[in-house]
Amino acid sequence: MPAVNKLEAAMNEETIHWKDKYKLDIEIIDLQHQYFADLINRLSVQLNQTDNLQYQAALISELNAYARFHFISEENLMQQAGYPGLQQHKKLHHDLMDQLSVKESRLELNHGESEAESIIDFLRDWFLHHTVVEDRKFADYFHAQTQPAD
Ligand SMILES: [Fe+2]
């Protein structure tokens, strides 16, 4: 298959398409999640277009920086809302950053050509699960706090 078609096929199969079920109805988090999903999609394409390991590492670090920002933002909101699951949720974020660091080191050490794409696969799966399951738990709590049933 020509490289361009291969890339298109990969994109269709692997692109995160934003769905209503990802929406938590907390504007700041929804905006950041949408940006996060777009970033994963964009970096997936850009990583496929280059063999330059240094550039690949720089692309991953762009994602790393945004993930860090987003997690702090989310945790601060949880803190503000008095969310009882904050510590547990922080641990999930922390574990993700740890796993990402390990994968980044492997990429920099050039262990396997497909390391960059495996990082994207990992992030995509993590993002979809975390948003739908874990962040949803906070959103349910948040809405119960801010919109008490009458
Ligand atoms: Fe989260």
Image (tube, rainbow, N blue to C red):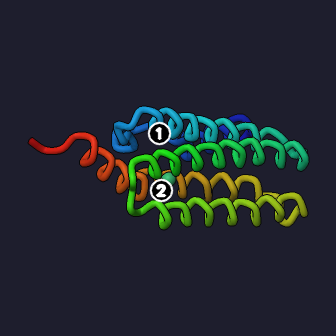
Whole-percent x and y of residue 28? 47, 34
State the image quarter where residue 147 is shown: top left
Tell me the tag on residue 130. Answer: 2
Q: Is mark 2 within 8 Å of ligand 1?
A: yes
Whole-percent x and y of residue 131? 45, 51
Whole-percent x and y of residue 47? 76, 43
Of residue 146 and residue 39, the one placed in the foreground of this image is 146
Q: Is residue 38 left or right of residue 85?
A: right
Tell me: residue 116, above or below residue 47.
Answer: below
The CA distance from mark 1 to mark 2 is 13 Å
Three-letter code for the amino acid on which mark 2 is drawn: His
Q: Name the residue: 70% across, 40% down.
A: 43
Tell me: residue 111, above or below residue 14.
Answer: below
Camera-near label (1 vs 2) is 1
Task: Give the residue at mark 1.
Answer: 29
Q: Are marks 1 and 2 in contact (CB under 8 Å)?
A: no
Quadrant (top left, top right, bottom left, bottom right) of the N terminus: top right
* Circle 1 crowding by C-alpha within 10 Å: few under 14, some 14–19, many from 20: many
Three-letter code for the amino acid on which mark 1 is drawn: Ile
